[in-house]
Amino acid sequence: MLKNTFLQIIKLILKLKKFNYQSIILHDNKNRSVFISFFLNSKKKININNFSFFCQIEIIKKILNILNFSFNKNDLNITEGREKNIFKKKYIVLHLDEKWFHKTYIENYINIEPSKQDLLFFLKSLYIFTRKQIIVTTGFTTPKILNNIFRYKNYKNIIFLKNLNFFYLEKIILSADLLISCHGSVSHIAAASQIRQIDIIDNSYNYSLWTKHFRKYCFIYRENFKNLSQKILLEIK
């Protein structure tokens, strides 16, 4: 990873100056990138700071237009042809990662952390409402609450999968009927596959910057888990 030391930046510039570029796109809004690109040889230099758009999909479309590329809605389907992990039964994925837990996420976001009792009630209600198998997944770290729920008891229609790598998690989402998650990488997997999703977001941030192009998409603002879980069930109905 590039460190922000002047010497390393100069070394990188000297390395990159060995080549001539058709186009350079500055897409990260960083002064470092602007500085580096100034010394590089390119027929076109495209800086998104010069655009008036405020969502990523419009920025991408503008860049494509400048480069004389066309945009097709099917270009959003970037997961086509990827392997799927198909279960025999239809299922819903609840991705319960660190974003659901107050101490492991942004503390000034509204607390949506469930109690063991409330989470188990929600999982059972989710099955009753949908009659579909519920698959609970998580991130790199397994929340204690999930270990407490699933360690000593198996549930017929609720499966807990932990320690998944990203690619296996992707396979599971690609075959799901519905994804319920806090906004993150899994949200973009579902959107790219046109999988229906309920995205849990905080009202302090404008997520439409990243989600304007999402298909089969619904969002619910964060609030205490009892109210949030009820709104999720109502949205599914």
Image (cartoon, rainbow, N blue to C red):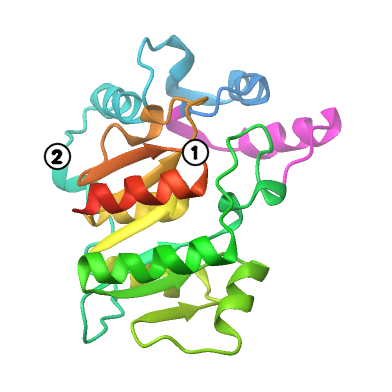
Give whichever of discs 1 and 2 has the lower sequence position: 2
Q: Which residue is mark 2?
A: 72
Is 228 in front, or is 31?
228
Is 60 in front, or is 214?
214
Is 99 in front, or is 57?
99
Instruction: Determine whether label 1 and label 2 are within 8 Å by CB.
Output: no
Mark yes or no: residue 141 visible. no
Residue 223, disc: 1
Residue 48, disc: none
Assess whether residue 205 is covered by the magenta stretch: no
- Asked which secondary structure carries label 2, the reply is loop
Q: CA distance from mark 1 to mark 2?
A: 37 Å
Look at 15% across and 47% down and name the residue there. Answer: 74
Name the quadrant containing residue 210: top left
Left or right of 95, for residue 78:
left
Q: Amino acid at mark 1?
A: Glu
Residue 18 image point, x, y percent: 61, 37
Vertical placement of residue 192 versus 25, above or below: below
Look at 23% across and 74% down and name the residue there. Answer: 132
Q: Which stretch appears magenta?
A: 1-24
Left or right of 12, for residue 224:
left
Vertical placement of residue 109 versus 90, above or below: above
Mark yes or no: residue 180 visible. yes
Q: Amino acid at mark 2?
A: Asn
Name the quadrant containing residue 149: bottom right
